[in-house]
Image: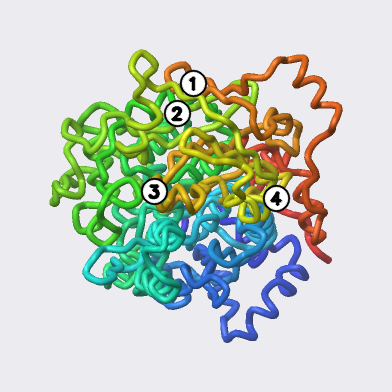
Amino acid sequence: MQDRGRRLRSQEWFDNPDHIDMTALYLERFMNQGITPEELRSGKPVIGIAQSGSDLTPCNRHHVDLAKRVRDGIRDAGGIPIEFPTHPIFENCKRPTAALDRNLAYLGLVEILYGYPLDGVVLTTGCDKTTPSAIMAASTVDIPAIVLSGGPMLDGWHEGDLVGSGTVLWRSRRKYAAGEIDAVEFVDAVMDSAPSIGHCNTMGTASTMNALAEALGLSLTGCAAIPAAYRERGQMAYRTGRRAVELVIENIRPCDILTRAAFLNAVRVNSAIGGSTNAQPHLAAMAKHAGVELRPEDWQEHGYDIPLLADVQPAGRFLGERFHRAGGVPAIMRELLDAGRLDGSCPTVTGRSVAQNLEGRQATDREVIRPFDQPLKERAGFLVLKGNLFDFAIMKTSVISEEFRARYLSEPGREGVFEGRAIVFDGSEDYHRRINDPALDIDERCILVIRGAGPLGWPGSAEVVNMQPPDHLLKRGVTSLPTIGDGRQSGTADSPSILNASPESAAGGGLAWLRTGDRIRIDLATGRCDMLVDEAEIDRRRKDGIPPVPADATPWQRIYRKTVTQLSDGAVIDGAAEFRGIAATPPRHNH
């Protein structure tokens, strides 16, 4: 079973003849569980199961049960399973934002993977930040690792219509403000969008990040899109456990898989599935910890010209269950591969290349997964913008509706160019307090701007940029206005916002000097977004100082603010990416 030319990492703890006293100490308390010393000293791979499921993380909670099948797979392949908890991250419920916890979960998992006798790890993922935090940690430590996603909920239905998690919330907000539904109908529609175990059934950040884990080569083929309630999810858990042991024997590590080519594949897949704008900071963070250069402009250079192939909410009509039955992520990747837009030579955790994994993986439902030459939209990637408001921001083009394009981006001779009057809000509290203030005189030619929502300002960066228009416009049928912000927006949102602006207002970015009433010009053709304000006036405003942000509320918030980088850089811990492959050097003994 064991590669006899290489001692396993766990043997430094459990089978070290040079330190028999320490070996005895490390073995002793594992015996409390009924484990025998013979097992741990046998040279069998010890495989950690990074358990992200708990009552505080309902999107991942079924991993508590799936772990049993992972254990079975590990045992049948000749390994020893050891399950342990990770820091809970629940997108819907963690305040002030779950983004605050991604780096904290990363730190905790790094210490576990480095400091304990683990030869490999199964990373259980699901809810948005659980996926990048786990992959970031696995890259830092660089022991064999494989991702087991939890899968989306079953499709939601409300009064005969498909309702997707998250997406129905934003649409119901608009209907409620317009007086089309009451509070009871609002809540009922949202509840009906979440009919089973699993994460978001839309192509929100959860589905996106698990799809990109598969696109990167870190999951078994077909893993990402299997609905949580399907029997195939348990079967995938078993196969993942088996493969985790084989990865240790074959010594296949994240550094072998997470190449620049793999990340560019993920960028392209994100465009084809209509993926979340949160993919940008998360992929940037994962690449940074993997030692891979992923430039901000790569999103446009390699992703913008990719067509939208998945007809899944919020960019399309359908939900995760039918997407899986249509062929899921492998079918999307096969379309890209056949069109010459995917690097099929990239290695994966299967031990085979991307191209080999995709053999026979054509789509089976062309209403949901379109052929490459018959897409929903020709160019569906992120536009990268810059100007005197920020050095970097992105705009998701796959959710630009025909109504939005006609109103703002179709002036003859100025296609793709829009100018409007800025309405500036300092945080979401300010937005909710004043959005319906008649004194602001908001009309359909205004641009809503929110600042103080980035990694430093919130702190953590909040999903607040997809602001809805004031009630009087919603009642007239104006369902969206151009919006700009230094925070993020939910991956389930159908708003073509300009977001993830870096540097943020709290870091002295241009949004800090913008005032309500200023004119803003957005030019999608040139990738510019500028306030039309004289430079001398901007210099004068700088003397007013940066708009205030809330004080630190916890010790971690203070540490986070002192260490975090900007969204363009992945909002990682400054300096943490210097630590890579740390498992190659065993940690010091503890006694």
Q: Is residue 364 above or below residue 526?
A: below
Viewer-closest of 326 and 442: 442
User: Which amino acid type corresponds to the residue marked 3 in the rendered image?
Assistant: Arg
The answer to whether the residue labelled 2 contacts the one labelled 4, judged by CB atoms less than 8 Å apart, is no
Residue 98: horizontal and vertical position, in percent? 61, 58
Query: Callout 2: few (<14), some (14-19), or many (20+) C-alpha neighbours within 10 Å?
Result: many
User: Which amino acid type corresponds to the residue marked 1 in the rendered image?
Assistant: Gly
- Residue underneath mark 4: 458
Residue 476 numbered mark, or none? 3
Q: Residue at x 80, y 26 (%)?
A: 541
Q: Is residue 268 above or below residue 192?
A: above
Q: Residue at x 61, y 44 (%)?
A: 487
- The quadrant of the image that shows the C terminus is bottom right
User: Which amino acid type corresponds to the residue marked 4 in the rendered image?
Assistant: Trp
| Sequence order check, earlier mark of 1 and 4 | 4
384 left or right of 380? right
**How far apart in space, not on screen, are marks 3 and 4 (Cα)?**
33 Å
- Report if residue 363 is visible in the image: yes
For numbered disc 2, what is the local secondary structure? strand
- Residue underneath mark 1: 527
- The quadrant of the image that shows the N terminus is bottom left
